[in-house]
Amino acid sequence: MQKIQTLIVELKKLFSVSGKAAFIFTVVVGLITHLSIMILQPEQADSIISAGFFKAGEYQLYSQGRWGTNLLNCFRGYLVIPTLTVLITILSISLAAVLLADLFDISNKLFAAMIGAALVVHPYIANAMFYYAISGTFIYALCVISVWLLYRKNMNLLYIMLSVFLEVICLSYNQAYLCVFTTLGLMMFAIDLLKGKNLKESFRYLGYSVIACALSGALYFVIWKFLSKIHHITYFYGMSSEFSAGQVFRKLPQSIINTYRAFCDYFFGNSFINNSFWNRELIYGLLFVILLVLFCIIVRINKLKYVNRTVLVCTLLVMPIALSVIQIVVTDYAFYLMMATGFLFIIPFFCKVIDLCDLQTGFVRVIKGIAMVTVGLVLWTYILSDNAGYMLLNQTTNQSKQLAERLLYQIETFEGFDSEMEVCFIGDLNEAYFATSDVLSMASPGGTFNNKGVWFGVWEVSDGWGKYIEQYCGVKLNYLTNGSQERIRTLTATDAFKELEIYPSDHSLEIIDGTLVVKLGEFVY
């Protein structure tokens, strides 16, 4: 009981002057940035489908390893209320900002505020936001708490157990949150080295992070394997038929190369965070160079020993692996915006490095000034990109609704159709039906923002248009759902399907073997 009371006291101390600054600034910037999604309330098929199968605990819930999603979705009662869920998300990120400011030992109000802003405007948060699910971003607070617990002064078994428990919960929502634990643990180790702390003590806390991460990963994996077996899962995340340690080791060299490629692309190349209207390579490249300069200045100020400098360099060289370690664990899956959980902490880490550089010379002041302007510019591009993405989604949402109404009309007026008949949507619509703004497409963060409407007519099955028509037209068709892949393949193999023309041709609908097939495009599987 005494340990719990001590923990509560520690939590109360979080809202110091810098903690309050981080919380308030994050809330304000978050509301300004994400106000448009609360007003426009755009949506696309992936979020509609996800809400359905996660609530029902269907096949996808276990095949993707997201068996713990319902544990967090219960906080909103499975309701999709955009304004409420966006507000909860912003408050959750604000709490994460407070915790991170304390974890990084930020005493300066300005840097604490910048850390909060960096978290709440990151394109990953915007990408998760339009799913209207607090679990996607609420977990960030849990992630930071789990690492924060490991770095308390009075380390004990209770804190480690709490940390492991929270990490398992986070991983059960999305494996990509593994990157948060590896990234924050390594960043804290680098910060300790830069401060000139005892090397043995620094390794001690890094060891706690590694142990907690390994235990939580193993426990999560065991639970996932058990659930996969009892639910007869035949393939795993990313359509991989194998998910084993052997697979990881066989592909380890290429996986490590992929992590460094993702890191270099983030600063200098074609990043998973898209924004064609900014000289991103110049901005991020400048950010990277300034970071290295500040590291050198801090090393000289604190007169780090040769061994400490060597360990610090090795830590920085390993950082790219920590940032996208999910590419090593899930080897068959492409790295994309929703996997970028670790990259959220690059700007906060950068703010801490600026804070550590306290040498009062003209040169250092100029470098720090350039650094802060660069951070501000990056955050501004994020805000603009997020809103461009929301506006793009709004365009495709309106277009999808209109298409859904036209599809429903053709289905209901098709000769021989009745409400009990099975309906199957096959193929992807031509992108000509989604004439979205090129300006918004180029300015958006990319990823799922650029998906065109109901972006898969089949989406493994034909859920996309079926659920979209149900959601926005108020008509529940007897459409083929999850688990109907073989039935769809059987229909596409018939001569009648091959003779069908592509929508909007009058001959794009046909009743085949008792199922009304709507051919939106060619079958690609």
Image (cartoon, rainbow, N blue to C red):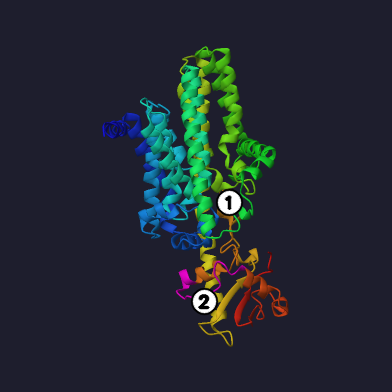
Which of disc 2 and disc 1 is earlier in sequence? 1
> What residue is drawn where x is 54% and y is 16%?
299
Left or right: 307 as drawn, with respect to 261: left
Distance from the alpha carbon under mark 1 to that under mark 2: 31 Å
Left or right: 18 as drawn, with respect to 225: left
Q: x and y percent of residue 239 in the render?
A: 62, 55
Relative height, residue 204 to residue 433 (above, below): above
Q: Secondary structure at mark 1?
A: helix
Is 471 a magenta residue? yes
> What residue is drawn where x is 40% and y is 48%?
89
At label 2, the amino acid type is: Asn
Q: Of residues 32 and 428, which is closer to you in this image? A: 428
The picture quadrant where one finds residue 520 is bottom right
Q: Label 2: which residue?
A: 478
Q: x and y percent of residue 271 in the render?
A: 62, 42
Q: Secondary structure at mark 2?
A: strand
- The reply to whether residue 170 is in sight is yes
Magenta range:
470-485
At label 1, the amino acid type is: Gly
Quadrant of the rendering where the N terminus is positioned: top left
Q: Label 1: which residue?
A: 447
Q: Of residues 103 and 373, which is closer to you in this image? A: 103
Is 22 a magenta residue? no
The picture quadrant where one finds residue 285 is top right
Q: Residues within 10 Å of mark 2 (few under 14, many from 20)?
A: some
